[in-house]
Image (cartoon, rainbow, N blue to C red):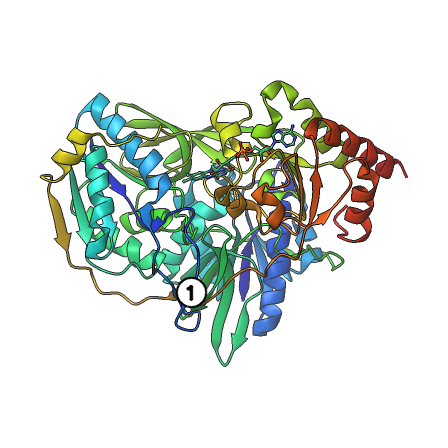
């Protein structure tokens, strides 16, 4: 059995969780197993996960699970995994996955790989799976030798497969230990796809000269439905919020499209973004190192080029 | 407060990444090493600030060979009181976590700090594993941490936002940007570090369940296609028709 933890946010399954369910289903097919999903806490529309490949959805509905505590989650997920006989347990490489997958690996005596970016291969009994290492500068293939395996899936690594049938839902009655971490408040940036999930990203750097010019970046992002990001010095000087900082010491992302505006392309910046499918660089300096990592380049003054690009995008959207 | 900071050694951020032995091993020849930035800049400094404000001690622990002592001494120079090195190659996250937990078990630390991830294997796994092995709460990606008695008020990054959390010590926490400001060791710190205790302990034996067996480099990018800055309609067309990303 392959067990996938599906996370919800505001009553809807997160895109990264739908990717994980798709990934779990494909992994199960490789292993000749079934894939089932697990949902913790208040949630509705659970049968929907069947459309993405889950043959069954288990639900632990205890409201206390709406307060996330990795220790409690690890205990509940491990117990559910034992009850259903899970051999592979899959998380998203999300904030929740990052703090829980390692705990579950310890509890289940499982080998684990975090942030995998491709389906596993099973060759003569050897279970191998790939992930990005050295902040995107290389890939490593891991071999897992344990009976039970724990994986967390990097966002945007696999397209979500829809089109299946709704799945039956079964409640699991499990002991939920008391939480030791209390969530006092959650603040989410409203209406914007978080960076790790974003398919389109518009990012800007020190070439912007100051925070007062960011309206041209926001306008382009809005027309495209993209999420905004920035380079480290921009976040360090407080021009932009630090959760927009991408790179080796920021968030590592792999969107379909990364547009870098007024960013030189230092190796530490590239580390977090060079696995993007397509990279566009807009820079007035033809020698900027970023052009070597780009698919499309525009040599020009961003203050002219960006408004022109926004206009062209608007036209394209209108057609 | 009794504080433990886990530090790892990583290649310097501009290091050329290459592999040897049929791409089965990282090629360390000519590579400069640093203390993992998240451990040094945020975890260690926040621990030192807490000690300065509330009293207590800061111990740093590293799982690694004798060559790692340069990094450990740097941590002492920045201000940690003492250090422990577990004398073993850090093969996997679980292996490292087991060694740290084995040491921490007998010591009753109030807080165990680590960086949110190491910049080489980018796992974010050691923290939650140490917490589970010690039976402690774990908070990841902390950007703010204040103590009120034995209660910690923590702000942490979550996907697309942040969370305000409360937890009673003892606990394990991983540090993200914002938790503290980088400190540069001064001459006095460097001199004092030479005399601070650095204990070397043997590892506990365990089996690795997950091992990296093969490495690859990303495919080389082809040449960049330059677009006339006057003609952004052409860029949009290419993104739609050729790259198929919009
Ligand atoms: C340990 C370590 C970790 C780091 N981690 C990160 C990280 O995670 N992320 C990160 O981003 N950086 C990181 N850095 C910093 C990195 O080395 C660079 O300093 C940083 O990325 C540069 O940011 P930038 O490109 O915005 O600014 P700059 O390097 O100043 O580049 C600005 C660019 O804008 C262009 N420009 C200026 N005006 C215009 C205009 N009018 N029109 C068009 N183009 C214009 C310039 O030609 C230039 O290329 C790290 C550094 C270290 C040492």
* Chain letter behind tag 1: B
Residue at 45%, 64% (x, y): give it.
Answer: A149
Of residues A104 and B211, the one drawn nearer to the viewer in this rendering: B211
**Secondary structure state at the residue bearing disc 1:** strand
Q: Is residue A39 left or right of residue A302?
A: left
Q: Is residue A124 above or below residue A310?
A: below
Q: Tell me residue A8's x, y (percent).
A: 60, 42
Q: Is residue B136 left or right of residue A115?
A: left
Q: Quadrant of residue A54?
A: bottom right
Of residues B245 and A62, the one drawn nearer to the viewer in this rendering: B245
Q: Is residue A29 left or right of residue B41?
A: right
Q: Tell me residue B123's x, y (percent).
A: 42, 52
Of residues B134 and B237, the one drawn nearer to the viewer in this rendering: B237
Q: Tell me residue A122's x, y (percent).
A: 53, 74
How would you rate the neighbour count of disc 1 (Cα within 10 Å): few for under 14, some for 14-19, many for 20 or more? some
Q: How many marks?
A: 1
Say which quadrant the N terminus of chain A sits in. bottom right
Residue at 39%, 35% (x, y): give it.
Answer: A181
Q: Badge 1 is on which residue? A: B19
Q: Is residue A316 visible?
A: yes
């Amino acid at each position: 059995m392959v067990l996938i933890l599906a996370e919800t946010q505001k009553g809807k399954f997160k895109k990264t969780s739908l990717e994980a369910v798709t990934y779990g289903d494909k992994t199960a097919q490789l292993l000749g197993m079934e894939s089932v999903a697990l949902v913790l806490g208040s949630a509705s529309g659970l049968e929907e996960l069947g459309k993405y490949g889950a043959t069954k959805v288990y639900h632990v509905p205890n409201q206390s699970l709406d307060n996330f505590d990795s220790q409690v989650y690890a205990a509940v997920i491990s117990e559910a995994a034992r009850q259903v006989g899970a051999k592979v347990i899959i998380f998203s490489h999300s904030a929740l996955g990052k703090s829980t997958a390692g705990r579950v690996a310890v509890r289940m005596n499982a080998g684990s790989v975090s942030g995998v970016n491709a389906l596993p291969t099973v060759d003569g009994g050897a279970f191998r799976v790939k992930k990005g290492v050295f902040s995107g500068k290389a890939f490593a293939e891991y071999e897992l030798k344990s009976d039970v395996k724990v994986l967390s899936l990097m966002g945007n690594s696999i397209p979500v497969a829809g089109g299946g049938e709704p799945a039956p839902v079964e409640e699991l009655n499990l002991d939920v230990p008391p939480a030791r971490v209390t969530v006092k408040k959650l603040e989410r940036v409203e209406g914007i796809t978080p960076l790790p999930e974003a398919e389109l990203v518009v990012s800007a750097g020190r070439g912007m000269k100051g925070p007062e010019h960011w309206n041209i970046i926001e306008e382009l992002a809005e027309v495209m439905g993209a999420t905004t990001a920035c380079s480290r010095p921009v976040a360090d000087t407080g021009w932009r919020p630090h959760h927009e900082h991408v790179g080796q010491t920021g968030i590592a992302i792999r969107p379909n499209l990364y547009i870098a505006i007024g960013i030189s392309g230092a190796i530490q910046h590239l580390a977090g973004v060079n696995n993007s499918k397509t990279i566009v660089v807009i820079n007035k300096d033809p020698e900027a190192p970023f052009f070597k990592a780009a698919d499309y380049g525009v040599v020009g003054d961003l203050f002219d080029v960006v408004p022109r690009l926004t206009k062209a995008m608007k036209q394209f959207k209108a057609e | 407060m009794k504080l433990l900071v886990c530090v790892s050694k990583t290649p310097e951020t501009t290091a050329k990444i290459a592999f040897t032995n049929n791409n089965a091993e990282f090629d360390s020849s000519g590579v400069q090493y640093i203390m993992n930035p998240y451990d040094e800049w945020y975890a260690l400094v926040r621990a030192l600030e807490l000690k300065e404000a509330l009293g207590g001690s800061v111990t740093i622990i590293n799982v690694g060979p004798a060559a790692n002592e340069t990094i450990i001494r740097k941590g002492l120079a920045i201000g940690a009181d003492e250090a422990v090195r577990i004398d073993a190659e850090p093969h996997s996250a679980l292996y490292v976590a087991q060694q740290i937990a084995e040491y921490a078990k007998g010591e009753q630390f109030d807080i165990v700090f680590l960086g949110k991830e190491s910049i080489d294997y980018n796992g974010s796994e050691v923290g939650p594993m140490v917490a589970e092995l010690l039976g402690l709460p774990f908070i990841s990606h902390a950007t703010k941490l204040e103590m009120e008695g034995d209660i910690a008020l923590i702000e942490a990054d979550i996907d697309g936002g942040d969370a305000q959390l409360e937890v009673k010590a003892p606990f394990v926490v991983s540090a993200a940007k914002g938790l503290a400001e980088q400190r540069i060791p001064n001459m006095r710190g460097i001199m004092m570090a030479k005399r601070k205790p650095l204990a070397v302990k043997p590892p506990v034996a365990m089996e690795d369940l997950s091992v990296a067996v093969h490495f690859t480099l990303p495919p080389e990018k082809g040449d960049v296609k330059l677009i006339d800055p006057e003609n952004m309609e052409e860029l949009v067309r290419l993104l739609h028709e050729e790259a198929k990303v919009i």
